Image (tube, helix red, strand yellow):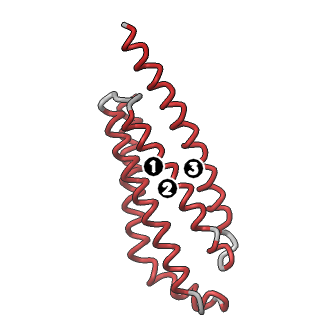
Amino acid sequence: MKRFSLFLSYLFCILGFLATLGMGIVFPFLDLQTLANVANVKDHALLCYVFSYAIAALVIFADVCLFLLLESIRKSQFFTDCSVRLLRAISWSAIAAGVLAVPLFFFFYRVIFISFIGLFLGVVLRVVADVIHRANEIKEENDATI
């Protein structure tokens, strides 16, 4: 069961990477119609593209960090400094993506929900990273005691 769960995690990680990469390539072609129909976005299309691609880059970076984290889990290295650094990188990426999505709210009102989700996910992952960091410290103290 553990192997199947890890397989699904890898699968979703790779699919997320490919979907984000594909959206980054296809985005200008599909979204030109939407941007042309929205009057206040037409003048600020470049700004929307810059923020969207910055968010996509952060998502790809977080996905690569997640893949590396899955690799350390596969090797049964749970409580390590590397895992903590990867979790913190993912959390900061989610927070940055949430913050970068806020200006897009003025053009697409649904984006505010994505922004809140990114910020919430970033804070939760930050707490998890701190818990794993503390668990790593306790593990190192126990290893040093024995």
- Quadrant of the drawing holding the C terminus: top left
**Residue that badge 3 annotates:** 122
As measured in the structure, the alpha-carbon distance from the residue carrying label 1 to the one carrying label 3 is: 9 Å
**Residue that badge 1 annotates:** 89
The picture quadrant where one finds residue 140 is: top left
Which secondary structure, mark 1?
A: helix
As measured in the structure, the alpha-carbon distance from the residue carrying label 3 to the one carrying label 2 is: 7 Å
Q: Earlier in the sequence, mark 1 or mark 3?
A: 1
Residue 116 location (% of width, % of height): 66, 58
Q: Is residue 146 left or right of residue 107?
A: left
Instruction: Classify 41 as above or below 73.
Output: below
Residue 117 location (% of width, % of height): 63, 55
Name the residue nearer the viewer: 9 or 126: 126
Q: Give the amino acid type for the residue marked by disc 3 in the picture.
A: Gly
Instruction: Classify 63 as above or below 111.
Output: above
The picture quadrant where one finds residue 72 is: top left
Q: Are marks 3 and 2 in contact (CB under 8 Å)?
A: yes
Residue at image location 63% in from the left, 62% down from the top: 115
Residue 51 location (% of width, % of height): 52, 74
**Residue that badge 2 annotates:** 93
Which secondary structure, mark 2?
A: helix
Q: Are marks 1 and 2 in contact (CB under 8 Å)?
A: yes
Q: Is residue 21 left or right of residue 134?
A: left
Neighbours of disc 2 within 10 Å: few (<14), some (14-19), many (20+):
many
